[in-house]
Amino acid sequence: MKNIFSFVKDKYKNIFNGVLFLLTIAIIVNFLPREGKFKYEFQRGKPWMHETLIAPYDFPIYKSQKQIRAERDSILDNFRPYFRYDSTIIQNQVKQFTEAYNQRLKKEFKEKYAEGELKESFINSNFERTTQDFYDYVLGLLRHVYGRGIIEASAVYGDLEEDSEIVIVRDNIAEEHQFSEFYDQKKAYKYVINQVDQYLENLELEERQADFFENLNLYDFIRPNVLYDEETSQNVRQSMLENISLTKGMVQAGERIVSKGEVVDSKTYQIVESLRREYESRLGSDYQYNIILLGQFVFVFAAIFVLYLFLYHFRFEILQDSLKTIFILILVVLMVVVSSLTVKLRPEVFYIIPFAILPIIIRSFYDARLALFIHIITIMLIASFAPNSFEFVFLNFIAGIVAIFSLTSLSRRGKLFLSAALVVVSYVFVYFGLSITQEGNIEGVNWENLGYFGINGALVLASYPLIFVFEKTFGFLSDVTLMELSDTNQPLLRRLSEQAPGSFQHSLQVASLAETAAYQIAANTLLVRTGALYHDIGKMENPIYFIENQDTDFNPHQQLEFKESARIIINHVKKGVEYASRYKLPGPIVDFIRTHHGTTRVHYFYKKYLQEYNEDEVDESEFTYPGPKPFSKEMAVLMMADAVEAASRSYTKLDEKTINNLVDHIIDSQLNGGQFENVDITFREITIIRGIFKKKLQNFYHARIKYPK
């Protein structure tokens, strides 16, 4: 039991990583659709590369989504909205008109009777007879417009043209009519007013009598009596859509479908696609379910295991950090889960999913190679259940590469917009090429997918806030944060410039050297520059003990033992880590502080000690930096730049030959000392770095701010 506990303790990291990867496999397999896979791969417009395909059983030929959409659109285009004729409205409006007219008439008589001098003329006039005729005439007009029908104006059923057909339900009998046969409320009122005006023009009326008729507000008695019946319209439309047949014919068992080498045209493609659909739907027994589950576990395990091997051999530091490992696996799982749910619920909008967001987020924190590898693994997993798997893989492979190489850094916000735009362009360009190849004509292109690609590009922009969330959650370092940290007005850098101005100037020179070299070997320039600015912050503890901060001929090391001097020099790394922790610098920047001397010796005091004491009595650990050695290309560049720049300060005069020898000697000693054994850096890159340092040092020497010793 003790041995087991010891084994678990020693191998805790490996065991935990194993559990994480197995859990990832379990989650992905759980979300995969439990359907068997058709064993033949095929493409429209390409030759059938397999043996002659014979129908194993009877199966229907399913219509394509495009055909179903066309039928659906045709039904919706020809659909006639339903309206209900309400016969009670005319009765109510006639009643209201009669009451209002009589009330107005009584008021008119009362006013006339009060005027005694006009009473006789009013009674003897034809006004009373005229009012009755006018009432009958208006009543006839109302019955006419209501009889023809006043249709309801509504946005519910959309804009109808004059020749559009509608269905009117009157007394439970449905009849088709043209929309132009009916008045709307405005037209009905206009018709009634025009007729009334013409009628009054033919009468010889006194001014006051004319006012009586003209002041009647007839608009109040014109209301729609042909009302839109939304419930019936929706029910009829839904019934028509449900009656769309999903199939068009049958294939009999034993019938030849396609021969080897025969080009798969649109008709054959639809038949083979129908067989695939039928084949996969029939794999439903418990035995087959378990077999499918086993198969899915095997290929998911293979994909995730390959991802583990890649990290183990090329990015082992990720496996050493549980948070980094979890981050990678969470991104893969999220993309697979979202894709699986979309295929199950809304497969037609599958291309809205922003698959390029995965490599963009990975690229923001790591290198392009890791981003591309993880992107490929993820799209291969999704391709196992994605519609049109070849098309899916090809589209997203190209889009992912475009996203990675267009997003060199996030230090400028416009970069992400450019990357999103290029992703959309690559999707549209490649999809258009694939579509016209498969269909053989431009008309066959599904233009709706191009709109989905546009939405996809807009969603890619969501990577910007996601990067911030992941950065804060997992303690990563994005380009935006690096830009903020590299500002020399940051509190810690200001303190360094005030307490150790020589070390600050040294850091600026090292940053310039390292950044230029990093750019030439395609390393992270922003990261190495920021690391260089902070690498010597530990010198603030005892700045006078470092030569660049000594402004007099006095050197405090002259009063110390060699071991004590070495201890103070070495201790600036430990103090730098403490300052970084106090000011909450991100972990990757702290790594630059810890590794910028690797496990090298404090050479000057070590040699002095050897000259004065017996070599056998030397404890080299007292003159050696604790490390660790650099474990990234950026850290290696900084270590070389720091040593070269510091050594150049000990020369009062530098010429081209001296600089060349200095650079070669320092870099060779670091290489031979095994300082870069954990770094994936090539001989060619080392050669480039040498050349950059030699050229930059010559420029520095002529423009250097000199500090007297």
Image (spheres, rainbow, N blue to C red):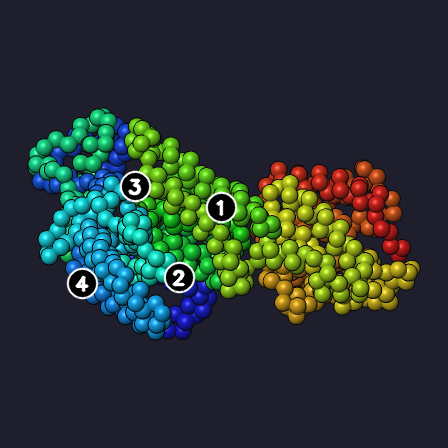
What label does residue 388 carry, if any?
A: 3
The residue type indicated by label 3 comes to Asn
Q: In the rendered structure, which disc, 4 or 1, sits on the residue that comes first in sequence?
A: 4
Name the quadrant containing residue 564.
Answer: bottom right
Instruction: Name the secondary structure under disc 4.
Output: helix
Answer few, some or many: residues within 10 Å of disc 2's Cα (few below 14, many 20 plus, some between 14 and 19).
some
Q: Is residue 281 visible?
A: no
Q: Nearer the viewer, residue 243 or 421?
A: 243
The residue type indicated by label 4 comes to Gln
Instruction: Look at 68% across and 67% down and name the residue there.
Output: 579
Answer few, some or many: residues within 10 Å of disc 4's Cα (few below 14, many 20 plus, some between 14 and 19).
few
Q: Which residue is under mark 4?
A: 91
Q: In the rendered structure, which disc, 4 or 3, sits on the residue that comes first in sequence?
A: 4
Q: Mark 4 to mark 3: distance in Å? A: 63 Å
Q: Mark 2 against mark 4, which lies toward the viewer?
A: 4
Instruction: Look at 13% across and 48% down and name the residue there.
Output: 175
Q: Which residue is under mark 2?
A: 20
Q: Which residue is under mark 1?
A: 420
Q: Nearer the viewer, residue 68 or 520?
A: 68
Q: Mark 4 against mark 3, which lies toward the viewer?
A: 4
Q: Mark 1 to mark 3: distance in Å? A: 24 Å
